[in-house]
Image (cartoon, helix red, strand yellow):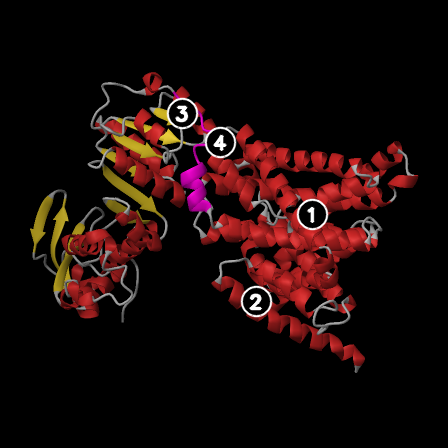
Amino acid sequence: MDNLLIIQDIVIILFFSIAIIFLFNKVKVPSIVGFLIAGMIIGPYGLKLIKSVDEIEVMAEIGVILLLFTIGIEVSLSQIIRIKKLLVVGGGMQFFLTSFISFIIFYSIGISLSQSIFFSFLISLSSTAIIMKLLVDKNEVDSPHGKLSIAISLFQDLMIVPLFLLLPILSNTGSTNISSIFIRVFFAFAITALLIITSKYFMRPIVHQIAKLRLREAFTIGIIFLILGTAYITHQAGLSFAIGAFIAGLILSETDFNHQIISEIVPLKDAFNSLFFVSVGLLVNVQFVFQNSLMIISLTLLIFLFKVLIIIISVSFLKYPFRTALLAGIGLGQVGEFSFILALAGTNLGLISADYYNIFLSSSIFTMIIAPIIYQLEPWIAEKLGSVGSRKISEERFINPNLKDHVIIGGFGVNGKNLARVLKETGIRYIVIELNPDTVKKEKIKGEHIVYGDISKEDILRIVGAEKAKIIVFAVSDPIVTKVGLKNVKKINPHIYALVRTQYVNEVEELIKLGADEVIPEEFETALQIFRKVLQKYHIPLNVIMQQVTLLRQESYRLMRKDDMDVSVLTHLDEFLAQGLTETFYISENNSNINKTLSELNLRAKTNASIIAIVREGKMLPNPSPKEKLLAGDTLIIIGTHQSVDQAIELLSGGIFE
């Protein structure tokens, strides 16, 4: 019966996990932090609800395998190419600077060479889960600091593979010379490369054959087999389970089945990952934390501030403003979940003692707690600290004295580029403000009217002539920048027409209060496009459709922002559906009804719709006789109810109605 205690432990963990997810979602803190704290509370050093962690660690290892697999499958080559500069320069500088400086610090205070290298790796990684949660909750995934944070985080994730390869080597550093270390590194990478090549030629055909069975359970079982099988092979080759899982994900990401694979595996990953993070918390000695609270708090703050500083330096090197660098630094200032994975692997290899492990684990957990809290200060940071480190630009150098009644475009993404193209064609003068230095450099070469700067800054707005501008369009993907910029531009020029693009409806009210003359939420515009297309399929007249769309757009989508929208304010569309309508149908050269007479077609008897005229070679043939043949190039004019006209068009297109 003792063997069944594992079920009791899992029940306890899952019970606390559900409560944690609910509670931490309410306070906008990533659930990972809650899992870690829950482990500390229910573990052998807390309430002792779980006393043995050996069985839990086995399931936690499965969670790690699934986590590495999902990262492998979500990392696409096209994504890496798209953000290659941010990834290589920003991510590379952050990782290697953090590793190098922290190694110097650890080694200088008397920690051994191998442990200093190992600890520097642990400090260098941040939590992908936490930063993605923060960015998604604030709608900032596409913001400049969001893109930078994701790029840096992605680089860290990619570094997991070589770090795992180096762990066995670090554990033997004391008895191994430099040449043998390089040989082992080369051997490890050679095995990894061989597995990738082999998997590429064997794994894809296997997945294809499994998919051909069209059985969901076979597909799920087959994918799990490939993940665990590859992980087992890498383990037998002297590498880790996690590397094999990452390789499997990387290979399967290039198949046509990657989206289905993700949908099947992610629920399993989430469940096992909760076990992993709780199991990490179980290992924290709560008594040790209380006894050494001052040291752990101090170390937590030092780690956080050190990582923020390194990221600020790395991002500033890419010529982004201080505000962007600071926000990226705060979001990535914590120690990541992969650090825990490396730490657990390090304990098995003797790279970290129990005391060091408790110190690292405790301080890391606290960095994960304070990062989301400090990130909530983002609006204050954007408004108060955004000017620090920004470049002062001479107004005489940029202002065009003749620029008047022009359009200011904030952001040169897809929306900004399309607007600029239209304005250029129509001869309306404009100027673009863009925060990406590479984009500014590239577009200036093309002759674009673009300046580098942050649209939220007063001095930048004055440089582009906001006092004399007629319209300003906020096409940026950063909600905080938009709000601060809107506030500042209205202070400079209260009469400027401010058009704001936003992704989500919950931002509309606040933007209007800040002075936006019109807000275009992408959520509502998508809904209106769907609304329009559906009505067109039911042959509602275009002028009626546009009337409804205009009505819904009035007062900044006020009607649609109500949960209980009163549809009675709309024209009664059911009346149009009950009425008859006239529609046209063109007979193409490959139409199967060519040379058929109208009597042979028998359209009225089959659909209750009538052909009242034929347009042929530019001439109208009204009331055609039943003997009239259909010719290629004819345009038929059909009359009937909505339903009968739909059926007539389907029949004329090749459908059959009895």
**Residue located beneath label 3 in the image:** 443
- Residue 622 visible in the current orientation: yes
Horizontal and vertical percent position of residue 640? 14, 64
**Residue located beneath label 1 in the image:** 201
- Counting residues from the start of the chain, the first of labels 1 and 3 encountered is 1
Gap in angstroms between the C-alphas marked 1 and 3 = 43 Å
Q: Is residue 658 magenta?
A: no
Q: Which amino acid does label 4 sit on?
A: Tyr
Label at residue 585:
none
- Counting residues from the start of the chain, the first of labels 2 and 1 encountered is 2
What's the magenta region? 378-393
Of badges 4 and 1, the one in the foreground is 4
* Mark 1 residue crowding within 10 angstroms, few (<14) / some (14–19) / many (20+): few
**Residue located beneath label 2 in the image:** 20
- Counting residues from the start of the chain, the first of labels 2 and 4 encountered is 2
Q: Is mark 4 on a helix, strand or loop?
A: loop
- Counting residues from the start of the chain, the first of labels 4 and 1 encountered is 1
Gap in angstroms between the C-alphas marked 2 and 3 = 49 Å
Of badges 2 and 3, the one in the foreground is 2
- Residue 205 visible in the current orientation: no
Tell me the quadrant of the picture where the N terminus can be found: bottom right
